[in-house]
Amino acid sequence: MNADWPDRLTARARVHAALGEPARLAVVELLLLGDASPGEVGRALGLPSNLVAHHVGFLERAGVVERSRSEGDHRRTYLRLRPAALTGLAPAATREAGRVVFVCSHNSARSQLAAALWADRSPVPTASAGTRPADRVHPLAVATARAHGLSLARARTRPVTDVLRDDDLVVAVCDSAHEELDPADRLHWSVPDPAAAGTGDAFDAAFRDLAGRVDRLAPAVHRTT
């Protein structure tokens, strides 16, 4: 018997092994629609920290999840799904919402791009807001949207207190906004701040990250009837 399996086959086998344990599959389902810290995973699933560390380590070694350092509280790390490792795995749950509202600190880049993408891909209404809104939308966000066939020409920054409603599904698209908002049922996307680098490449990377996440979330959200 030939034991020299192709790399692609052994990689797939590692993923199947990682998902063959209920707790690890629960972690993956939790991360399908948003990012979470290990502590948030433990609270959501009722798992002690040592088991969270064990299962997350297994998933990391299989290439299913990865972690990044919070841009807000640098003591925190966030876990995010690597969707390419789970081709064909669809979200198991659906959400109902009157709107989907994307929130970041300044409401000048990530939340604006996410809302523009959402409007292009879903019939569910959308809006964006900031916990500490800037005076204007970042020019590179406007240029990036335009390069991808979207428009932020009329976009304006607004504070969350003027935007949020009770039936909104809130998606925090930056670590700082997630950590600043009051505890609530929301999704978190740990998208690096492109304004920190201030380059077109950084904004394009953020756009592609957001586009993939919007494409995964849009089929799972239905408008409240």
Image: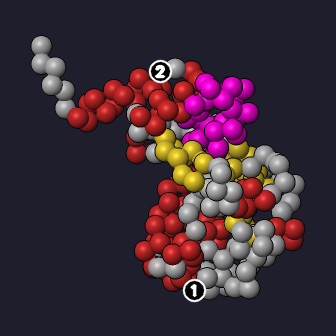
Q: Position of residue 25 (x, y in %)?
A: 54, 28
Three-letter amino acid code at disc 1? Pro
Is residue 30 inside the magenta stretch?
Answer: yes
Earlier in the chain: of badge 1 and badge 2, it is 2
Three-letter amino acid code at disc 2? Gly
Q: Position of residue 122 (x, y in %)?
A: 61, 59
- Single out the residue that lies furthest toward the left: 1
Compared to residue 176, the image places residue 112 above or below, namely below
Image quarter of residue 166: bottom right
Residue tagged 1: 139
The quarter of the image holding the N terminus is top left
Q: Assign a secondary structure to mark 1.
A: helix
Residue 183, labelled with which disc?
Answer: none
The Cα–Cα distance between marks 1 and 2, rounded to whole angstroms, is 46 Å
Binning the other alpha carbons within 10 Å of mark 2 as few (below 14), some (14 to 19) or many (20 upward) gives few
Is residue 44 inside the magenta stretch?
Answer: yes
Q: Position of residue 24 (x, y in %)?
A: 54, 27
- Most frequent secondary structure within the magenta stretch: helix
Is residue 193 in sight in this rendering? yes
Of residue 46 and residue 113, the one placed in the foreground of this image is 46
Which residue lies at the image location 51% right of the left edge and 67% below the top edge?
A: 207
Q: Position of residue 194 (x, y in %)?
A: 54, 72
- Single out the residue that lies furthest toward the front: 75
Is residue 121 in sight in this rendering? no
Q: Relative to residue 205, is residue 115 drawn left or right?
A: right
Residue 20, labelled with which disc?
Answer: 2
Instruction: State which region is magenta.
Output: 27-53
Which residue lies at the image location 71% right of the left edge and 74% below the top edge?
A: 106
Binning the other alpha carbons within 10 Å of mark 1 as few (below 14), some (14 to 19) or many (20 upward) gives few
**Which colouring convention does the figure follow?**
secondary structure
Which residue lies at the image location 57% right of the left edge and 76% below the top edge?
A: 195
